[in-house]
């Protein structure tokens, strides 16, 4: 592979590169996410719909036509148990779906860095073969974040930023579970504020887009008195929101991950290719979505006067020429 230098990016550049990656590969990313999200959202909607009668009946039909405030309401424990099981099942489906769709998007976007033809099928296969590790990481991540927010808001906020690149670590470095979380924290150390800033801005952008789409669709759903129509519209809104926000979040995370490794370890495209199982000998040119400014290597034989990566590590000095 040709030596294509990567340089650290400023916060604005990280967002700019992520948006360009997202926009350039949008059709491929949408296909990968749709194949995962659409069936599971439909399944979740069916489970939720089937448990609705249990929820209303099991809780005594509060607010219904037959509700009598002077009568003690009886809870059907069987219906309540079914409702709770359905709720847990929907949550489990959501975790698996989110991890698989995000991982497939990350693999596709990593390939875009190498100039590979981005294929949604191979990206989805790459993620699927790591599904067990992805789900376990998602559960650990959720538990750690939940504990952080439960103890105090500040630890939860810190962990949200510190553990943000755990999934790329799993996919590119094959570190799993607690090791992936620890590696993410190690990479973010010393760069928490910029990472948190990028995550915050990207979350606001995604929330605006998702809110506009969901608000429009939900408004239509509320205007309909047909319960089935409302369920269908709500499912369409959930699918549409996932198609828009999942690839964008993945683009931000992969750019953050690569930038952190460039800063701390001299990460390059050859290492990226090896991490995702691509051919490291494939010729590469600077990806068009990256900003210019990384220094080119000088003539052969002068390597000792060049830093291993840019900007130079603390304390680096060029060797004195004779």
Image (cartoon, rainbow, N blue to C red):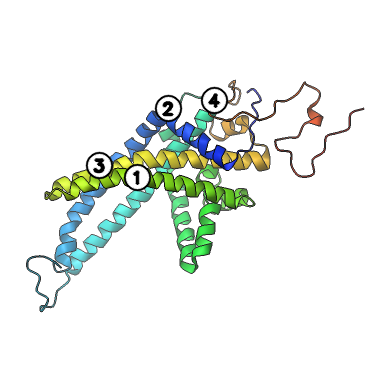
Is the residue under label 2 in contact with that under label 3 (CB below 8 Å)?
no
Q: CA distance from mark 1 to mark 4?
A: 28 Å
The residue depicted at 71 percent of the width and 38 percent of the height is 311
Residue at the disc numbered 1: 210
Q: CA distance from mark 4 to mark 3?
A: 34 Å
Side of 8 where 83 appears, left or right? left
Residue found at the far right of this picture: 322
Q: Position of residue 184 (x, y in %)?
A: 57, 49
The residue depicted at 9 percent of the width and 74 percent of the height is 68
Task: Check disc 4 and report its element: helix, strand or loop.
Answer: loop
Q: Which mark is residue 224?
A: none
Side of 228 where 287 appears, left or right? right
Of the numbered discs 3 and 2, the one sitting upstream in the chain is 2
Task: Check disc 2 and report its element: helix, strand or loop.
Answer: loop
Task: Check disc 3 and report its element: helix, strand or loop.
Answer: helix
Residue at the disc numbered 2: 119
The residue depicted at 49 percent of the width and 59 percent of the height is 144
Residue at the disc numbered 4: 288
Against 115, residue 233 (above or below) is: below
Q: CA distance from mark 3 to mark 2?
A: 25 Å
Of the numbered discs 4 and 2, the one sitting upstream in the chain is 2
Residue at the disc numbered 3: 236
Q: CA distance from mark 4 to mark 2?
A: 19 Å
Side of 30 where 103 appears, left or right? right
């Amino acid at each position: 592979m040709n030596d294509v230098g990567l340089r650290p990016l400023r916060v604005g550049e990280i967002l700019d590169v992520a948006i360009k990656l997202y926009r350039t590969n949008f059709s491929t990313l949408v296909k990968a996410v749709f194949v995962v999200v659409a069936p599971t959202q439909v399944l979740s909607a069916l489970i939720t719909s089937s448990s609705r009668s249990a929820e209303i009946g099991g809780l005594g039909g509060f607010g219904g036509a037959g509700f009598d405030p002077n009568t003690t309401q009886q809870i059907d424990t069987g219906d309540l148990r079914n409702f709770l099981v359905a709720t847990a099942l929907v949550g489990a489906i959501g975790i698996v779906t989110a991890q698989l769709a995000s991982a497939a998007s990350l693999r596709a976007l990593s390939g875009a860095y190498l100039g590979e033809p981005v294929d949604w099928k191979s990206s989805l296969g790459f993620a699927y073969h790591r599904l067990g590790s992805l789900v376990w990481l998602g559960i650990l991540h959720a538990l750690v974040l939940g504990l952080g927010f439960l103890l105090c808001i500040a630890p939860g906020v810190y962990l949200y930023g510190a553990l943000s690149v755990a999934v790329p670590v799993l996919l590119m470095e094959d570190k799993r579970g607690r090791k992936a979380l620890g590696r993410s924290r190690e990479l973010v150390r010393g760069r928490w504020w910029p990472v948190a800033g990028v995550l915050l801005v990207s979350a606001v952008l995604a929330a605006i887009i998702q809110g506009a789409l969901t608000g429009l669709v939900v408004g239509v759903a509320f205007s309909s008195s047909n319960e089935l129509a409302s369920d269908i519209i709500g499912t369409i809104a959930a699918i549409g929101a996932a198609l828009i926000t999942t690839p964008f979040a993945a683009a931000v995370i992969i750019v953050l991950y690569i930038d952190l490794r460039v800063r701390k370890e001299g990460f390059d495209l050859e290492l990226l290719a090896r991490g995702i199982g691509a051919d490291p000998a494939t010729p590469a040119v600077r990806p068009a979505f990256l900003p210019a400014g990384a220094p080119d290597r000088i003539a052969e034989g002068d390597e000792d006067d060049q830093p291993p990566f840019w900007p130079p590590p603390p304390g680096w000095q060029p060797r004195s020429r004779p």
